[in-house]
Amino acid sequence: AQSVSQHNHHVILSEAASLELGCNYSYGGTVNLFWYVQYPGQHLQLLLKYFSGDPLVKGIKGFEAEFIKSKFSFNLRKPSVQWSDTAEYFCAVNLGAAGNKLTFGGGTRVLVKP
Amino acid sequence: DVKVTQSSRYLVKRTGEKVFLECVQDMDHENMFWYRQDPGLGLRLIYFSYDVKMKEKGDIPEGYSVSREKKERFSLILESASTNQTSMYLCASSSPSTENEQYFGPGTRLTVT
């Protein structure tokens, strides 16, 4: 069975700092990869996704993620965070065209101090 | 915009009660999902459905059942609520036509006392 692990449960940083959240998955076949974000009191919403092509994916709000197939990783990055990036971030994987289920990581709570 | 709505934002029930959580989506999506979200565990799939009257168990189906009588509506049922079912419940929908990107509802925070 596929699994998804996020390395950090909690991250605290100051505004303008750079952010990188790790995500690794365990599945050897074709995968679709997602990062979702949940701002306090809001719906879970899609930040970015990777299906194929350029492994560097750009999403909303200045976020990007890089798919490294050899490392089974899909790390999320933002060069300079803002207080409004305080949220919980979830990495998710599905089995490409063969699957419609998502497997989620445990989430990373990010607190950006003003 | 896709809209997924859930019947309640907050719900308090007593142990042993039967609980119904309703989810409605307005985008004609084939797939619908129920997750529970617990701190440190992320989202865990309870059940999903890929068509009307079809259902599949997810990773943690014990203590739950589901019903999908209409394409837009997917219900989660707790036959006899227990305190370990206190959680945030999230509904989502998706479609192959949107590359199976899942759209989420606002969630129902259920407390079982």
Image (cartoon, coloured by chain):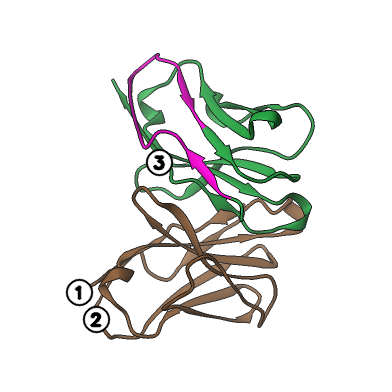
Chain colours: A green, B brown
Q: Position of residue A93 (x, y in %)?
A: 62, 47
Q: Chain of mark 1?
A: B
Residue type marked 2: Thr
Dot 3, crowdedness within 10 Å: few (<14), some or many (≥20)? some
Residue at 70% across, 32% down: A69
Disc 2: which residue: B15
Q: Are marks 3 and 1 in contact (CB under 8 Å)?
A: no
What percent of the width, then of the height, locates residue A82?
40, 22
Q: Where is B1 relative to A62, above or below? A: below
Q: Is residue A8 left or right of residue A101?
A: left
CB atoms at circles 1 and 2 under 8 Å apart?
yes
**Corner quadrant of residue A74:** top right
Label 3 amino acid? Tyr
Q: In which chain is the residue bearing label 3?
A: A
Q: Which residues are magenta?
A: A3-22
- Count of residue discs: 3
Image quadrant where one finds the C terminus of chain B: bottom left
